[in-house]
Amino acid sequence: MTKAQRFRKIVRGNIKNVIHYIDRNYVLRKNDKAVRPSKQQICMFCSSCENITKEHIVPRWVFAKDTKAFFTVSLNGLDQTYHKATIPACGQCNSEFLNDLEKLIQRLFENRDVASVPFEWDETQDIIRWLELIDYKFQVYNITRKFLASKKVGKIPYLMDFPLYMLLPNKGYSPFQVLSAIRRSLKRLSVARKYPHLNSLVVFKTANKGFHFFHTIDEFIFLEFPKYQIALFYFFKEEFNNTKAAHEKAMEIIEKVF
């Protein structure tokens, strides 16, 4: 059994444990107040509570290890550096499984002219796995981080202790729906074959000099890597008959954002 197969098996076998932990520590409310999370963190992949480390949501090599690079949380307008945006992961999942996938993706991108040498099917599946992993990590980040305040309005007492995920305006999720979405994302990580979604990944060759990123949880993600002259757009749930249809829809969204 390969490391990737072991990781998928571990994730699949611990979905129930991870969801239960998230529910009890970040979703549950008593007397209309958030419960105090346990001091004991767990790995958000295997549910182990031993040797907990910090796993970056967006890998450091993606933003050139720039500690000042940041993204803006659309809900409250507050900025968060990529460097400090992490989730709990045990040492084994972090260094053995996740790090291996990161290195694989970097190798795929290096010295690659995607216009003349497109990714092969197996390579595309690995990229999809990597993007699904980022989506899951953002879901964990959004359920474990409180709203706190709005950049425009300031503190809103009633909303301060709500998880970001519970307030996303484009979702309108109930607690049950939030847990269902996180569970669905975990199940994606445990699926070996990504063939039904191969057309959902759009790969661009880019000449832009800056790193660009945007993401809507459980829907799509866009990442642009100036170092490799590659940009990726992936639809997490939507399937397409061909890449042309996916490309057209991706461009519609990109044009709205930029």
Image (spheres, rainbow, N blue to C red):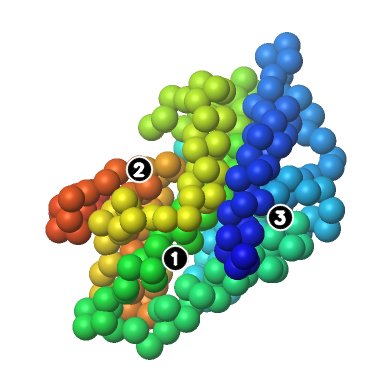
Residue 34 shown left or right of residue 167 in the figure: right
Rendered view: 209 above or below 145? below
Classify mark 1: helix, strand or loop: helix
Rendered view: 62 above or below 9? below
Observer-nearest of 238 and 125: 125
Badge 3 crowding class, 10 Å Cα cut-off, few under 14, some 14 to 19, many 20 or more, is: many
What number is the disc on residue 71? none
Q: Which residue position holds label 1?
A: 126
Residue 222: x and y, percent? 36, 58
Q: What is the C-alpha distance between the residues marked 2 and 3?
A: 25 Å
Q: What is the C-alpha distance between the residues marked 1 and 3?
A: 20 Å
Observer-nearest of 158 and 197: 197
Observer-nearest of 104 and 54: 104
Q: Which residue position holds label 3?
A: 89
Picture residue at 82% right of the left edge, 48% below the top: 49
Q: Amino acid at mark 2?
A: Lys
Q: Amino acid at mark 1?
A: Asp
Quick one: label 2 or label 1, which is nearer the N terminus? 1
Rendered view: 161 above or below 233? above
Badge 1 crowding class, 10 Å Cα cut-off, few under 14, some 14 to 19, many 20 or more, is: some
